[in-house]
Amino acid sequence: MIVCAATNNPGKLKELRRILERAGHTVKSLRELGVDLDPEETGTTFAENARIKATAFCRATGLATVADDSGLCVDALDGAPGVYSARYAGVHGDDDANNQKLLAALAGVPAERRGARFVSAVCLVLPDGRQLTVEGECPGAVAFDLRGENGFGYDPLFVPDEVGLPGGGKAPNADRRSYAQLADGEKDAISHRGRAMERLEQELPGFLGQ
């Protein structure tokens, strides 16, 4: 299936492309499709925002479209930044500012109270109007400093509870590495987006057969 990946975030596009192509689909980016659209994310949940984006880009391209809305929910901040993760510091997509604001908000909060989870809602919309929305989560904690270069967003600050293993399966993150310190395979196996996409792939045959 040819799928439009509805994101302008290079890091997110890389992950969506990697996961979808591994599942046998052909992925087209917005740049490849020549689509310049910025739908307003007015939803109050990750699932609502994912549907808004997937629906808008499906209409614009005429292709099956996958959109993700994701964010970091920190326990000590009552779930913030949540759906506002990408614009937490005021400017959409300013990773450095967002990370610094998060560190400032957690200043003085001890390790045992820095629990957090990454959440991803992935929505697939077909040209005939059918929609499938799934979610995935990854539990972990917020570190005290930025670690690693292999990631984007809050990846350098988020320490997952588990990591993926080369031959499959998962193991405790004994080294307390951040998302940005993990290899692609280690992250995809346990990441919020990886888990959401795995669920999408599981439900897709039945959905397409409806």
Image (cartoon, rainbow, N blue to C red):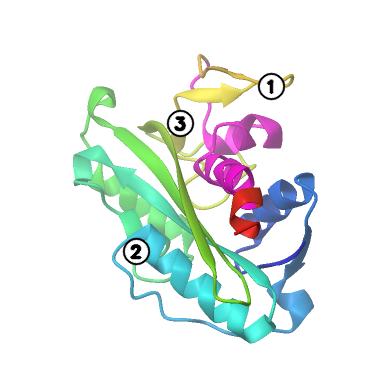
Label at residue 168: 1
Label at residue 188: none
Q: Is residue 179 magenta?
A: yes
Residue 38 % position (x, y): 52, 82
Q: Is residue 208 magenta?
A: no
Of residues 195 and 139, the one nearer the viewer is: 195
- Residue at (64, 46) in percent of width and height: 201
Quarter containing the C terminus: bottom right
Q: Which numbered disc flags the more N-terminal residue, 1 or 2? A: 2
Q: Main secondary structure of the magenta part?
A: helix
> CA–CA distance between discs 1 and 2?
37 Å
Residue 168 % position (x, y): 69, 21
- Residue at (60, 41) in percent of width and height: 198
Q: In the picture provided, is 1 more to the left or to the right than 84?
A: right
> CA–CA distance between discs 2 and 3?
21 Å
Q: Which one is in front in this view, the residue at disc 2 or the one at disc 3? A: 3
CA neighbours of label 2 inside 10 A, class few (<14), some (14 to 19), many (20+): some
Quadrant in which residue 87 is drawn: bottom left
The furthest residue to the front: 210
Q: Amino acid at mark 3?
A: Val
Q: Secondary structure at mark 3?
A: strand
Q: Which numbered disc flags the more N-terminal residue, 3 or 1? A: 3
Quadrant in which residue 74 is drawn: top left
Q: Which one is in front in this view, the residue at disc 3 or the one at disc 1? A: 1
Q: Which residue is mark 2?
A: 89
Q: Amino acid at mark 1?
A: Gly
Q: Which residues are magenta?
A: 175-204
Residue 116 % position (x, y): 33, 37
- When the figure is inspected, residue 139 is found, relative to residue 88, above or below; the finding is above
Q: Which residue is mark 3?
A: 159
